[in-house]
Amino acid sequence: MSTNVVRVQSPEGMKKITLTKRETAAAFLKKVAKEFSFSSNGFSVYLNRNKTGEILSQNKTLSLLKIKHGDMLFLFPSSAGPSSENMDTIQEDEIDQYLSKQEGKIYRNRDPQLCRHGPMGKCVHCVPLEPFDEDYLNHLDPPVKHMSFHAYIRKLTGGADKGKFVALENISCKIKSGCEGHPPWPEGICTKCQPSAITLNRQKYRHVDNIMFENHTIADRFLDFWRKTGNQRMGYLYGRYTEHKDIPLGIRAEVAAIYEPPQIGTQNSLELIEDPKAEAVEEIAAKLGLRKVGWIFTDLLSEDTRIGTVRYTRNKDSYFLSAEECITAGHFQNQHANACRLSPDGHFGSKFVTVVATGGPDNQVHFEGYQVSNQCMALVRDECLLPCRDVPELGYAKESSTEQYIPDVFYKDKDKFGNDITYLARPLPVEYLIIDITTTFPKDPVFTFSSTLRFPIENRDALGETQDFHSLATYLSQCFSSSSSFLDIVSDFHLLLFLVTNEVMPLQDSIGLLLDAVKTSTEELAQTWKKSEQWATIEQLCSTVGGQPSGSLDYAMGGPTLPQSSSAVWSCLHCTFMNQPGTEHCEMCSLPRS
């Protein structure tokens, strides 16, 4: 009996299927499923590339379906990825939606020396540039090494096809599941299921282009813990993403508050403890219009306590981020993935940032911002990267074992003759994984939380700063003595957290109006909430602790702002200079201690 050969093209390649002249469509589809290792309903076969003329499982012969010897058929897996309709339902961040609608062009003025046309004309010397123009970015002051993520998207979608076939694929270091042609790893592996080797490249774009703290008070209060104990500290940055106008289509992470989770810190280590209040903090931040945008940690060693200098340890001769810190940053970035319509997975990269408070070249405290690349995120997510024990600037790509297959990881470097040499990433210099981000403070400070007095920060029991109703009574007495408005009194992130999470009288279900008042800076809403039964109960608890009615608590009776001791080094409230014991005026700014 004569046979025919039909070609079947799929996303993984083309294969030839041998058929008899009386082959039915049902038998043909079974052969296709076996050849391509699909289940019986995991694919569809069409006569045309545009998915028309589907071949259904029926008893009709292929000749009746007009399929002849040498014909090309087209196979499409049912789970090839999200359709365009599903991709349109992905909810991107507001800043991403805003920037995707902007033109992004870099407009230039008419050059009086090179332009030979009238004021309404354009030439190569003054025509608008694309947002990803490398020459323009390199000539900025200071030069910009990484284009913005939305400029990178414009570069991908700027061709004749307008990005019709663009897909931002997330790197996977795991074996693809569902391969039935061989036993599972470690007994077998093939080119279909084996992940590709990874060659590390310096990422040309970054998801966040600038980090800005709203004011110095946020950072100073965070640093107070190190100033008073000498131990390192970590916190989560809460804020919002806005447009960064200094870079075309850039994104800025604005920090409005720092939340310090439970942790154990020493002079050279940090250990995070499970936080029972994590969900409540996220809920409060969301109602205030904030979100977790990054994390911050200190790496400070005092050099001279008399003049307040710190050691300059992180530089080009040592490292900027250690391998362990890169792995931690990658872990956080994987937890806070960036929603993206152009990715089949619905997410690509992350806008979660890392800030290090460390010594600078002038031996003063500097804040340095970073992210890790998408390649590093993939290596961390799939558990392929380890830190080196004695060399913090080196990571190590794991080797394959019977439990896990690890693809080869390479990086390129130049030898002494200037030639590009490929090295196996065992070990791996972590600078291939790091993207630096400028960290700034504004000339004109901004205050999302307008309280001028300081309610104790959470989880600082080691300093003797506890959040309880005694500290609340002290805080309120100070506020009443300073004649602050009620909105200013409650406009403190740490106070709001205490009101919601305290064990005596949590206000989680009844504080919504107050959070709206703080979010919109509306005194009328705050006064309305002040008349509630919950606040009356809070005042009664404070008066019980303080010993006087809350409305008439005197500043002197309420207690001092901070525990003071004549035999301890104290920090100036105005300039944060560390003063020697026994002095009542700051040696740096000459202002009084209180």
Image (spheres, rainbow, N blue to C red):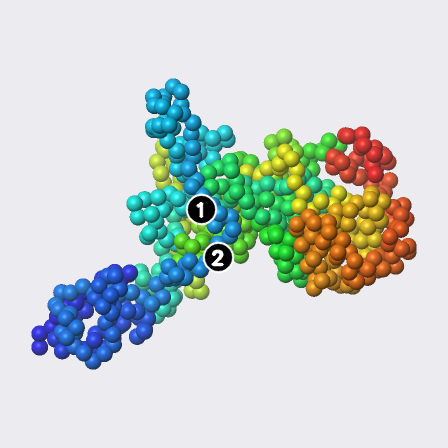
Alpha-carbon neighbours of circle 1 within 10 Å: few (<14), some, or many (≥20)? Answer: few
Alpha-carbon neighbours of circle 2 within 10 Å: few (<14), some, or many (≥20)? Answer: few
Which residue is pictured at 34% across the width and 21% down the height? 116
Q: Quadrant of the N terminus?
A: bottom left
Determine the secondary structure under disc 1: loop
Position above or below: 46 against 420? below
Which residue is pictured at 33% across the width and 47% down the height? 162
Q: Indicate which disc, 1 or 2, sits on the residue closer to the N terminus.
A: 2
- Residue type pointed to by label 1: Lys
Residue 571 position, x and y percent, is 77, 39
**Relative to 117, is 284 on the left or the right?**
right
Q: Quadrant of the C terminus?
A: top right
**Relative to 192, is 466 on the left or the right?**
right
- Residue type pointed to by label 2: Gln
Position above or below: 120 against 537? above
Q: Which mark is residue 101?
A: 1
Q: Which mark is residue 91?
A: 2
Which residue is pictured at 78% across the width and 56% down the height? 530
